[in-house]
Amino acid sequence: MTQSSGQIAHGIDGGATKPLPHATSTGVTPLARPSGTRFRMTAHIHGWLLLLPSTVLLVTFTHFPAVTTIIDSFFSTPKGRRSAVFIGLDNYQAMLDDSVFWRALGNNIVYAASVVPLTIALALLMAIWINGKIAGRPFLRLSFFTPTVLPMIAVANIWLFFYSPGYGLLDQVFGLFGFASHNWLGNEHTALACLIVVAIWKDAGFFMIFYLAALQQMSPQLAEAAALEGASRWYFFRRITFPLLMPTTLFVLVNSIINTFRLIDHVVVMTRGGPDNTTALLLFYIYEVGFKFWDTAYAATLTVVLLALLAVLAIGQFVFLDRRIHYQ
Amino acid sequence: MRYPKMKWLAPIVGAIIMAWTSNVTAADVELSFYYPVAVGGPITKIIDGYAATFEKENPGIKIKAIYAGTYQDTLVKALTAFKSGEPPDIAVLLSTDMFTLIDEDAITPFDGLLKTDTDKAWVKSFYPAFMENSQTGGKTWGIPFQRSTVVMFWNKDAFKAAGLPNKAPDNWDELVADGKKLTKSDASGNVSQWAIEIPSTGFPYWLFQGLTTANDVRLTNSAGTETYFDKPAVVQALQFWVDLSRKDKIQPAGTIEWGTTPKDFFERKTAIMWTSTGNLTNVKNNAPFAFGVAMLPAHHGRGSATGGGNFYLFKKMSDEKRATALKFVKWMTTPERAADWGIATGYVAVRPDAWETPAMKKYVADFPAAAVARDQLKYAVAELSTHDNQRVTKALNDGLQAALTGTKTPEQAMKDAQQEAARILHTYK
């Protein structure tokens, strides 16, 4: 009870707006403790009431489904009159034996490992370019950002024709240089790369916006000081700009990685996982198992793996990278 | 202060409630009807028109059409609705979904509803090829509505330019011989026009059945519990498909996108394409050259697979409602309606007597290509369908694509597919 004032002073979020007069008075005179307790009660209620709407939404649409998914993964799929029975780890065992699952996981790792660094590099490059004083800057900014505004389904349908053999844009351009027509999406070696290109093209402009905002926050004095010291542009970028952009990079990194596991619209439109599962990504496979095979329990199992994977990645990023980031 | 403002609301609310209740009393039976098409577009208008006419002819019945997207979307929505206790009353879903729907215990067979002799004759009035995957275990689970089949479209101008007679290849040997003349390369050796494209994305098994049936082999038993993917005749058929690209070099290598195949045909990138009769109207409107429609080429026999959607009746309806639903399905499949629907959409009219109606006779006289699909029906087989259908077809699709891209030999690909299918199906025996 004696610590009540301290708790109020830097404790509850909900009461954080106006606690100061109370906090100081209760801190000074122990006599005011009853009113402090009452205050703490109301602050508690107030706080929880403020949190209620988002808590209800989060619990209903995120936490509750996540928990039921984990529970479902230990049961068999109910079919017709056969209801679900507890089967322990059988679904997980089946998953380990499932070659398509490993294929999808492998594809997804290759996909993320290519999309994430390339997207970030491209976004940074574009941001630095259009941050400078160049002719036609608004037009450039707009054109870099356009892919983000378009819906993925529409974009994928357009790219489908870019890649089509013979008269597709890509083949027409290559044709000018005398290359033979290539079946880009129908070849097991190029299909995944085609999807990677679409994903980079789609996301780079979006992440560019964050880099651009961060760059414009940066004090011009730094550049002036560096110029006086005679630092080269590359040295300035390496030692000043890039480290100062690290918080943005972390944000972009987290979001980009999540996107590579979350966005599969282009797979559905362009390849449907083919040829022979070379473009099946994890979430696409989960969709297939859940809503085409109707094996909901197994889909839940795969979802648990996806959730665990994302959780590990997020924790890793926040815990390990955060230490090495300098916040202004 | 607030109450006077509310006053004008009362009559409006009253009017709305009255309008609503009078509506409900007028339509004492309402049938929800899931139909697989995206909202808007010409097909939606046709269905809306049918529903309105039906309601006018049958006062007291209301049809609530719900446009649910693609076949796949519609199945997902219907089954999810069923699992949450609010299934649709009627739905048009793929004929191949029959086993899935039976396994989910979601649909009722039509047999119990067919009391009179005319009812029983009605079920027998459809083409047997379409009934093949509407019936199993001696019961009728689906009624054919929008059915299609694979046919061959060919570019007459390209045939003429290649010095070929004005006739589509009638068998596999002719296809390869004609194909070699139809494939054109430019000066640097790059192919500018392929002879043939058999699409292989999405549902390659469906087109593959055009090859296996011609090679006189079936892929499954009719109970949907066994597959025969590794039979030598199946492997042979796949070898022929792979050879079109690899040995004869008259078809592009790798998998061929289903969605862009018609465009390839219009752009003269391919002289022949295999695709659904559902594309007939599309080709008729967009091909910038004279084109022909032909049956798929024969080998040991002739053949193609049927496809498309059936009417299904969902469970949880009252008996009275079910009788009404049957009435609607029967109304939608009368010879006149089947003919009208076929002419408007390009789907194959599902019963022989529809082709005898004056409207259809006139249509066929003006556009003889429309009758090719009908004539091919006597050689047609059911689209591949088994228990746990999507999983089994995926096993086959993966195998076909692996063979077409060259990652596996046809023998190996079909052996793996068969093994996987057998593993999936062993619980259904």
Image (cartoon, coloured by chain):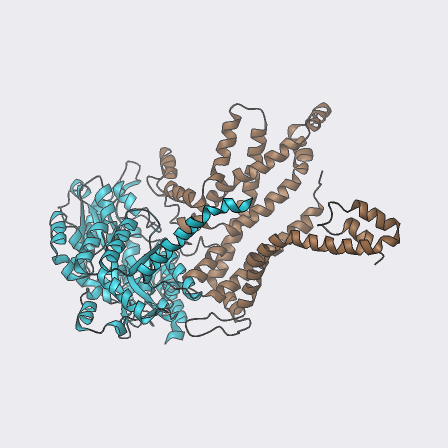
Q: Quadrant of residue A131?
A: top right
Q: Is residue B419 left or right of residue A35?
A: left
The residue lying furthest to the bottom in this view is: B429
Q: Chain coloured brown: which letter?
A: A
Q: Position of residue A28 (x, y in %)?
A: 88, 49
Question: Relative to residue B121, is residue A246 depicted above or below?
Answer: above
Residue at x 73%, y 54% (from the top left corner):
A42
Q: Position of residue A223 (x, y in %)?
A: 68, 27
Residue at x 55%, y 72% (from the top left corner):
A88
| Residue nearest the observer in this picture, B332 or B272 | B332
Question: Which image quarter holds the N terminus of chain B?
Answer: top right
| Residue nearest the observer in this picture, B405 or A14 | A14
| Residue nearest the observer in this picture, B125 or A5 | A5
Q: Position of residue B303 (x, y in %)?
A: 21, 61
Question: Relative to residue B193, is residue A233 depicted above or below?
Answer: above
Question: Relative to residue B306, is residue A117 depicted above or below?
Answer: above
Q: Chain coloured cyan: which letter?
A: B
Q: Position of residue B383 (x, y in %)?
A: 28, 63
Say whether residue B381 is visible: no
